[in-house]
Image (cartoon, rainbow, N blue to C red):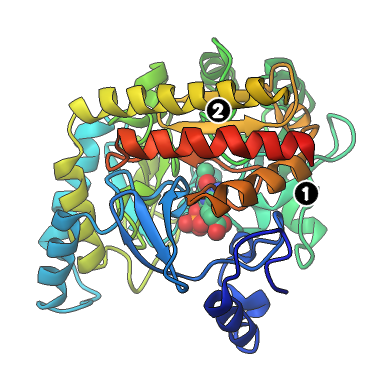
Amino acid sequence: MGTECGGPPAKKSEKLFARAQESLVGGVNSPVRAFRQVGGTPRFLVRGKGSQVWDADGRRYVDFCMSWGALLLGHADPAVVQAVRSAAGKGTSFGAATEAEVRLAEEVKKRFPSVDLLRFVNSGTEATMSAVRLARGYTDRQKILTFEGEYHGHADSLLAKAGSGVAAAGLPGSAGVPPGAVEDTLVATYNDLASVEAQFRAHDGQVAAVLVEPVAGNMGVVPPDPGFLEGLRKLTQDAGALLIFDEVITGFRVAAGGAQERYGVRPDLTCLGKILGHGLPVAAYGGRRDVMERLAPLGPVYQAGTLAGNPIAMAAGLAALRRIRPPLYARLEKRGAQLESALRDAAQAAGVPVTVNRVGSMLGLFFRSGFVRNYGDARSMDAAAYGRLFWALLRRGVYFPPAPFETVFLSAAHIRPDLDKAAAALHDGFREVAHG
Ligand code: KE4
């Protein structure tokens, strides 16, 4: 334990981490938070405001993780906080229909014209798990096709890793997932339409849906090649399968209407999360009316949830979407380009080969040279070097995601001084990585 990665002493985080491990598995409620991919003691955060967070030892950081992309407006956005406070005073949950959930659904539909009907749930995992069940129920087919290196939450059927060879089904990607749970999960290669066609040929008439992160954000950031998403659209259409966009990260992030707006490809179903609740536990799945109407209480596909459409979460989402206006995306594009340049310049100055991928305000950093177009490219990076950079940045008050295969996020709250601080920290940090 301790801050062996050279980080500054963090006595209070260390004490809290020791105590947490007595009650919480690994001391955390989600594995990536344990800092095991970068080493050292996880920082216990106590407060956030705008682009800044503070840890238990009183240290301040510019945050480029932003709750894994949920906070497009920044921490403790005043309008979101006020909306949460006001909603909480009227009751924390009813387990009944409310006007707030109708209004938030209408706001989603304004931004996602492919969504005729939707259903709110409490996590991205629930959204993708339910969308897959619905696709199977609608098509009366069992196979689903996903992409190696993408992540859609922890539902059994989606914790599959690539099997050997094209025809092989996915293999369990986690203990506790029985082979039967993933025998209908096919795995293809992102940005490789031929690998998708091969799976469709090997399982003709059996594929219910293709589930894709339209911009991969869980293998680092990997954008779709020109034509890739359009190719998936055509392949699924021709095969009578549904196209499901997992926009839990990209929704409201890469455009107001997500990747489907940015790339002009219309899926049959869409999964949303993160920014939708702006930090409150909200997610959703929605799409074509004829598909969604197969869902209970209208149809035979079952899905339910005690806290679905929670009034406080709905209020947070409504307040956030009201504040996320079109001019914001030009600002995020500009800030994203500035951070991208800072990353490239610092690595080049230190003579460290890196590839930087970026879509708007989501950036991926790979310690390797050459294009990164899929998971095979991504995983060949020097992940240990990322860990060294992480700590070099943390020592200088810059908090990147504590894991290499994640996304660096900006928000509306990141201003020029934050970018300048990051650039300076990156300049020194890459030199430290280069000279060990
Ligand atoms: P949740 O169940 O964690 O709300 O959402 C699952 C999910 C679904 N789809 C995409 C594209 C996602 O990125 C996620 C979750 N993202 C991770 C970070 N890459 C959440 C962080 C964590 O696991 O703690």
Residue 62 in the image: state x and y as whole percent.
41, 49
Q: CA distance from mark 2 to mark 1?
A: 41 Å
Please tell me whether mark 2 or mark 1 is closer to you in this view: 2
Q: Which residue is mark 2?
A: 343
**Label 2 crowding class (10 Å Cα cut-off): few <14, some 14-19, many 20+?**
many
Label 1, residues with CA under 10 Å away: few <14, some 14-19, many ≥20:
some
Q: Is residue 279 left or right of residue 37?
A: left
Residue at 72% in and 45% down: 184
Amino acid type of the residue that numbered disc 2 sits on in the rendered structure? Leu
On screen, residue 23 above or below 198:
below
**Image quarter hosting the N terminus:** bottom right
Question: Which quarter shows the C terminus?
Answer: top right
For the view shown, which residue lies furthest in the right direction?
164
Q: Is residue 29 left or right of residue 82?
A: right
Give how far across and how far down residue 217 sits, in percent: 55, 37
Left or right: where does residue 119 sit relative to residue 372? Answer: left
In depth, the one of 435 and 220 nearer the eye is 435
Q: Which mark is residue 183?
A: 1
Residue 311 against residue 5 in the figure, above or below: below
Q: Residue at x 59, y 26 (%)?
A: 346
Label 2 vs 1, first from the N-terminus: 1
Q: In the rendering, at what x and y percent does residue 34 appear?
A: 63, 66
Residue 307: x and y in percent read 33, 71
Identify the amino acid type marked 1: Glu
Residue 245 seen in the figure: no
